[in-house]
């Protein structure tokens, strides 16, 4: 049996009690200020919860974080499942040791856009047992929020352990202004009964519920394509309806999720065109839409003006932005929901990285497109141009009108290229 981890047994000394020289009140003020400074550089803070163990909550958190990263977003994934941290294993980052700098503790980079922090990355041995009571858990979570150099992020995804105990309570209270919770369940009534408590938990803490995800929704036969409801069906949808919260969709029971988790490559990356990845993609579009809504309110100039680019070919929205004849550049007033002006611009030749930089010079704040690869989305984001994909081909004036009226319907991120 491996040795137990107690008190300061993790490698990072910052998890110990606060040093001397300040009163408890001063320490608390400094910690709150440090958390506020770190969290102020993060766009959306989303907490993944479940009142039931074994429903695949970490699988959902990891795949959502990876999918957002693949969409060009800067993402942090914070694993606060202190007694069963699986995130590093699922992302194949078990071996790296943490590095501390003058700016704080550096999270481990999975790729260009995704960074991870977990107690598993602080342990001397992978199989060490963490035997901590509530105050020590609270201290570690506070350390993750105040002393980890997350940098500028579009999203912070927090993977909590099952239940409504110390870890999720500490996260919600310390962050203070989290954007909401994603509640994960499986279809059977035993799971739904426990997960119901997570919604009650969120309501009592004034934490918005972004929606319910039903995991392990049905086993798809690889031979005939039929679906077998091993755990029943409809529990997640019924739960969402009961509490009048959004239902984000169903994730099938897919053997590839098991192998991808063991191999350290999330299924959205190992099988990006499979049905399971498409299911995660539908959830990610909800998160990106909420981010876009926030960007419209927070990043638009004080006078409510912004510029929206639409790729156009043959007079309609062009599904592949790089093949368009023109860009229709609309100047809009988001407060009055009106179009102030419109230009048809001839773009430069489509070479990698050219159009994002060019549209940025034209003052574009947003591009509405049919489909776009993750690399292109990343380049647009880097140049300060938000991206909305999934628009269908049609009159660009009608597309802008629908956007301003919050009635624009988007589908899959696909194009005709």
Image: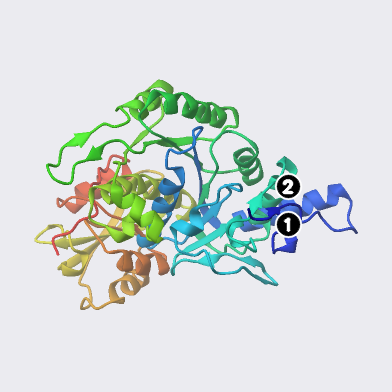
- Give the left or right position of residue 393, taking residue 6 as reference: left
Q: Where residue 54 sits: x, y (%)?
A: 45, 39
Q: Where residue 397 sits: x, y (%)?
A: 20, 50
Which residue position is annotated with label 2? 136
Bin the neighbour count of mark 2 within 10 Å (Cα to Cα): few under 14, some 14-19, many 20 and up.
some
Which residue position is annotated with label 1? 15
Q: Where residue 317 sits: x, y (%)?
A: 17, 56
Q: Where residue 364 sits: x, y (%)?
A: 35, 63
| Residue in view at x 16 percent, y 68 percent | 323
| Residue in view at x 42 percent, y 50 percent | 291
Bin the neighbour count of mark 1 within 10 Å (Cα to Cα): few under 14, some 14-19, many 20 and up.
many
- Give the left or right position of residue 8, taking residue 226 as reference: right
The residue lying furthest to the left in this view is 314
| Residue in view at x 57 percent, y 59 percent | 117
Disc 2 and disc 1 in contact, CB within 8 angstroms: yes
User: In the structure shown, which secondary structural element does the residue marked by tag 2 occupy?
Assistant: helix
Which comes sooner in the sequence, label 2 or label 1?
1
| Quadrant of the drawing holding the C terminus | bottom left
- Residue 52 sits above or below residue 69 on the image: above
Where on the picture, by quarter, is residue 188?
top left
Regarding residue 68, the answer to whether it shows in the image is: no
């Amino acid at each position: 049996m491996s040795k137990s981890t107690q008190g300061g047994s993790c490698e990072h000394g910052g998890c110990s009690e606060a040093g001397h020289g300040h009163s408890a009140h001063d320490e608390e003020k400094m910690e709150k200020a440090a958390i506020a400074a770190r969290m102020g550089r993060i766009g959306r803070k989303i907490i993944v919860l479940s009142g039931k163990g074994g429903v695949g909550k970490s699988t959902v958190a990891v795949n959502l974080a990876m999918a957002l990263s693949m969409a060009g977003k800067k993402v942090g994934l914070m694993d606060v499942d202190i007694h069963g941290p699986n995130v590093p294993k699922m992302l194949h980052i078990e071996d790296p040791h943490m590095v501390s700098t003058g700016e704080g503790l550096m999270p481990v980079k999975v790729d260009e856009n995704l960074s991870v922090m977990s107690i598993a990355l602080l342990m001397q041995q992978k199989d060490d047992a963490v035997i901590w009571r509530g105050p020590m858990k609270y201290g570690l979570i506070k350390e993750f929020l105040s002393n980890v150099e997350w940098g500028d992020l579009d999203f912070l995804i927090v993977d909590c352990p099952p239940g409504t105990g110390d870890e999720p309570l500490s996260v919600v209270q310390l962050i203070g202004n989290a954007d909401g919770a994603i509640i994960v369940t499986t279809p059977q009534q035993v799971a739904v009964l426990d997960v119901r408590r997570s919604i009650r938990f969120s309501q009592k803490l004034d934490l918005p519920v972004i929606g319910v995800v039903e995991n392990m929704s049905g086993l798809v036969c690889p031979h005939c394509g039929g679906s077998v409801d091993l755990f029943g069906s409809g529990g997640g949808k019924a739960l969402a309806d009961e509490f009048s919260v959004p239902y984000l969709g169903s994730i099938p029971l897919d053997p590839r999720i098991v192998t991808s988790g063991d191999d350290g490559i999330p299924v959205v990356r190992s099988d990006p065109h499979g049905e399971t990845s498409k299911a995660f993609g539908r959830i990610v579009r909800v998160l990106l839409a909420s981010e876009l809504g926030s960007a419209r309110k927070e990043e638009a100039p004080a006078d409510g003006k912004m510029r929206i680019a639409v790729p156009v070919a043959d007079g309609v929205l062009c599904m592949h932005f790089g093949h368009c004849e023109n860009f229709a550049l609309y100047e809009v007033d988001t407060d009055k929901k009106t179009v102030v002006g419109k230009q048809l611009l001839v773009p430069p030749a489509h070479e990698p990285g050219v159009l994002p930089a060019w549209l940025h010079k034209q003052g574009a704040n947003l591009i509405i497109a049919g489909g776009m690869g993750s690399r292109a989305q990343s380049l647009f984001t880097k140049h300060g141009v938000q991206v909305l994909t999934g628009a269908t081909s049609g009159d660009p004036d009608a597309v802008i009108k629908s956007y301003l009226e919050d009635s624009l319907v988007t589908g899959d991120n696909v194009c005709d290229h």
